[in-house]
Image: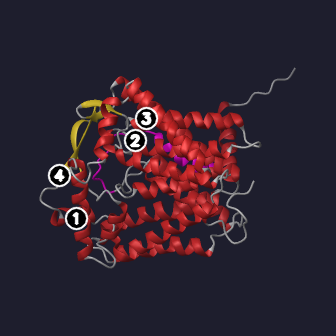
Amino acid sequence: MALTLQRPGLRQGLTVRRLAGIVIARPSLAAAATVLLVCVPTGEKDVAAAVHVTPADLASLALVGLVSVDLLRGRIRRLDRTACLLFGGIVLAAAAATLGSIDPDTSLTGFVRLVQVFVLVPAAVLGALRDRRDLRIVLGAFVTAALVEGAVGAHQYLTRTGASYTGQPIRAVGTFGALDIMGMSTVVSFGLLAALALALGERGPGGNRRLRLAMAGAAAFLAFPLAVSFSRGSWIACGVAATVLLLRADARLAVRGAVLAAAAAVVLVGGLGLGASGVTERLSSIGSVSAAPDQSVSDRYDLWTTAGRIWQDHPITGAGPKAFQRLRDSHAPLRLSSGSDAADATIGFQREPLLSPHNMYFLVLSEQGLVGIVAYAALFLALLLGCLRRARAAGPDLAALALLCWVTVDFLYADIGGTTTVLTSVVLGLAARSALPGPDSRGAYAE
């Protein structure tokens, strides 16, 4: 009997080429990899550094390259006129702000980042999503990443190994660390909404019961790490997005969901005491953000005031990308803190500088002026209205609608920055695929 021997190196080479061929044939896998690689720890970083390149960023650039090749070869359709106008408006606004910047060299890196986040990667995701399977691949990546981060975050809370919150190491931050305090809550929120949308999509006689139960279970589990992230912004954004999703799917289901969520909160927090020490206090503080704001909230208000003052000095095209941090001290109220506290077992205690207004709309207004805010408003409004118009009670567009709602609400008290920024790009691509299917398509996703 003859034996065929194959060298390990040759076998590995064949495997790599086979995997590369699969990704080239279905670029949505690159989009899914972009989502999953957000979970890779990048180490504690200098938040004041001009450029941060993460594994997820590299995967997003690979996605852009794959889709660009397919576009040149005619394998995918070109962007329709509406998408070109919306994305082109962002490019023109960022370019005008860069050319008129107070520091063009620094603003150039900001221009590149803005084009990556709001134009190139969303357009690549739009081209990569060709059918319903592609959508499920990407949404499945959101759920998987959230389960990984949620498990790590839950462990941090239960074992008291998380970031500091009210002097105790109980804040769930996942693999992101105390310097990226919103990272885990963002990933978990996206995964929870994606799981909920997938579960709703499997209702009815033709749905997959096992998938529906699995996704419902995943959404229920993710509610706990989201709670112990103690992120008021993520709670509000997730609550609004989930409400929109449920109301769009079934108003009666939304009422039942609210009752079940309230009952679960009573059992977990009131009965078992999970997160009771911090969650109830954090919830009660939401109602006092106007009458008696804490230091973090008052700092945020001062940063918004600072952005408004910068815009008044540069009303048309703004001060330029990345100019806020340079002009902050000359325009900020005297009571603004120098930074926020961050602490965990890895970095100890340190102050994190406040380098942005923590509001995407104020950031755009101050750095890109009226031209920029009009371009971004046009993009977000067009995508929101398109998703609302096309979302069906049991369709995949529900996920895009919910994720986009989360982003637009979260941008009221947060802005781009950190490892999870590239997830915003993927969400915008999902929303664009739902809202802008093109004139030759009867629906956003083919079977």
* Range drawn in magenta: 29-50
Q: Amino acid at mark 1?
A: Thr
Q: Secondary structure at mark 1?
A: helix
Location of residue 258 in the rendering, given as x and y in whole percent from the top left corner: 50, 42
Mark 1 touching mark 2, by CB under 8 A? Answer: no
Name above or below for residue 192 compared with residue 78. Answer: above
User: Foreground: 45 or 256?
Assistant: 256
The circle on residue 338 is 4
Q: Amino acid at mark 2?
A: Thr
Label 3 sits on residue: 225
The mark lying in front, picked from 2 and 3, is 3
Image-quadrant location for residue 68: bottom right
- In the picture provided, is 397 more to the left or to the right than 103? right
Mark before the other along the chain sequence, 2 or 3: 2
Question: Can residue 175 be seen in this snapshot?
Answer: no
Please state which of the two labelled residues, at mark 1 or mark 2, is closer to the viewer: 1
Mark nearer the N terminus (1 vs 2): 2
